Image: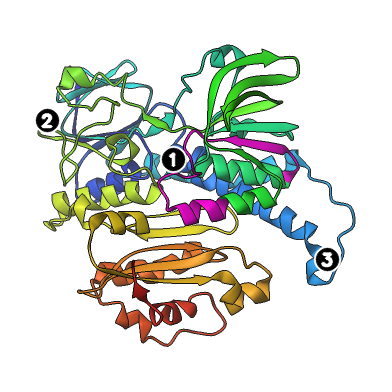
Amino acid sequence: MPRQFDAIIIGTGQSGPSLAGRLTAAGMTVAVIERKRFGGTCVNNGCIPTKSLVASAKAIHMARRAADYGFSTGNLFVDMKKVKERKDRIVAASNHGVESWLRGMKNCTVYQGHARFESARTVRAGDDLLEAEKIFINVGARAARPPISGIDQAGYLTNSSMMDIDFLPAHLVILGGSYIGLEFGQMYRRFGSEVTIIERAEHLIAREDPDVSGAIRTIVENEGIRVLAPADVLSAEKRAGGVALRVTHSGRTEEVAGSHLLAAIGRVPNTADLGLEKAGVTVDARGYIQVDDELRTNVPGIWAMGDCNGRGAFTHTSYNDFEIVAANLLDHDPRRVSDRILAYNLYIDPPLGRAGFSETAVRNSGRKALIGTRPMTRVGRAVEKGETQGFLKVLVDAESKLILGASLLGVECDEVIHSILDIMYAKAPYTVIQRAMHIHPTVSELIPTLLGELKPLE
C-alpha cells in the first residue's frame, strides 16, 4: 500500500523547498523527493558557484590593474585549488542549509532517490510508493549535448562538471556564446587560460540587440578572448593533451585545438525519465512540461515549477513560480505567470541588466516609442571607478509614457536595473523616475538624466 501524504514535491530547486515550507505551515503532510544534491542547479552548479568564481576572477583582474589605481601587487599567482575551495565552502553552506531545513521541517518527510510516476496520484521513490492528491514537479534542467560528430569520444565539460575543476585549463574552447559560455569564458581568461568562444549565431547572446551583443564582444575580446561568430563546428576528435574541432568560419574551414572543451549550447529539462506518460502529463517536443498561467499541468492536481516547465530559465523565475502556486493555493490571491516582466542579468564584468522588451522587439511591434542612450564614459561613478565600458539604454511608449524595456550594460548595472523594473511593475509613467532625486555619485543617478533626454525611435 502506498504511504499517504497531502502533497508530494519532486525536486529541491528554488521552488520545491519554499513550497514545502508553506504547505507544512498550513498543516499539510508533505513528501519531498530528491535524487541528488539538495538545492538544485542554482545552489550546486549554477548561480551560487559561478558567481563565487566570478568574484574570484574579478579580484584577480583588479589586482592585475593595480597600476591604474596607483599601487603595485607584484607578481600574481592564481591558486586554482584555493579558488575552488572558496567556491565549495559557499556552495556547501547553501546545500546543507536547504537539506537541514527540509529534514527538520515539521510534517515533512524527505526521500532520497529517483522519482517516477506510477499514476496521476502515485510516485515511486526508490522502494517507497507514495500517494497524494497534490503533486508538484520541480526537477530542473541540465546541459544539452552538442549534436556534433565525435563529441562523445572527444570528451567535453558542462556547467556541472566545470565545478569539479581545481586546475587551470591551458586553452578552454567554449561551444556557445550566450550567458553560460560568456561567464565561464571571461572568468577563466582572468584566471589565466587561453579562451576561444565559438558561437553559431551571427552575434553573441543572439537574443540581445546588435549594439548590446557588439559591445559585449568588444569587452571580452579586449581581455584576449578569441570569438568565432558566426561559426559551425563540423566535428570533434580527441587529441593527445586535448581536443580538436573542425570549424567553418568566415568562409573557410579551420582547426581549433584546445586542452579542454566546454559545451554551453543550451539546456534540456530533466523530464524524460519521470514516467510522466503514466500520469498523463503533457510535454512539448523538447520535453518541457506544459502548464497554464497558474502553473497547472493538463492533469488536475499536478503542477510543474522551475526550469522544467519552459516558462523561465532563471532562479528568480523558479522562485516566482513557487510564489504563484502558493498564492493561488493558500492565499486565495490570483497570481499568474503572465503578470511578471521578463528580467535577467548577464554576470560578465561589467554586467548586463535587462528588463522588458529589447529595442529590436519594440521596433518589430511597430508602436511609437522613445529611446534614451548614454555611454558609461558619461557616468561619473563609472569614471571614478575606472570602469567605463558599456552603455545605458531605455525604451518608452510614446503615448502611455510607460517604460517598455531597458538594457543596462555597465558597472553596477545588475543592481541598477531594479529601479527601472520596479517602475514597470508599478505601471507608472517614466516621469516618476525621471523627476526623482537620486543620490550622487551613483550609476542610478543617471537614469533620470537618461529619461530626460528621450528621442523618437526612428
- Write down the residue under mark 1: 39
Dot placed on the residue nearer the N-terminal end, 1 or 3: 1
C-alpha span from label 2 to label 3: 63 Å
The C terminus: image quadrant: bottom left
Range of residues picked out in magenta: 191-216
Please determine whether, in this image, residue 178 is positioned above or below residue 375. above
Residue 67's disc is 3
Please determine whether, in this image, residue 445 is positioned above or below residue 372. below
Residue at point 36% right, 87% down? 435
Dot placed on the residue nearer the N-terminal end, 2 or 3: 3
Q: At label 3, which amino acid type do we have?
A: Ala
Crowding around mark 2 (Cα neighbors within 10 Å: few <14, some 14 to 19, many 20+) is few
Q: Which colour scheme is used?
A: rainbow
Q: Quadrant of residue 309?
A: top left
Crowding around mark 3 (Cα neighbors within 10 Å: few <14, some 14 to 19, many 20+) is few
Q: Quadrant of residue 449?
A: bottom left
Q: Circle 3 sits in a helix, a strand or a loop, which is it?
A: helix
Residue 64's disc is none
Q: Circle 1 sits in a helix, a strand or a loop, which is it?
A: loop
Residue 427 in the image: state x and y as whole percent.
23, 71
Observer able to see residue 95? no
C-alpha span from label 1 to label 2: 26 Å
Nearest to viewer (mark 1 / mark 3): 3
* Horizontal arrangement in the rendering, residue 251 relative to residue 361 (left or right): right
Residue at the farthest right position: 74
Q: Circle 2 sits in a helix, a strand or a loop, which is it?
A: loop
Magenta residue check for 194: yes
Residue 42 in the image: state x and y as whole percent.
46, 43
Q: Are marks 1 and 2 in contact (CB under 8 Å)?
A: no
Dot placed on the residue nearer the N-terminal end, 1 or 2: 1
Residue 299's disc is 2
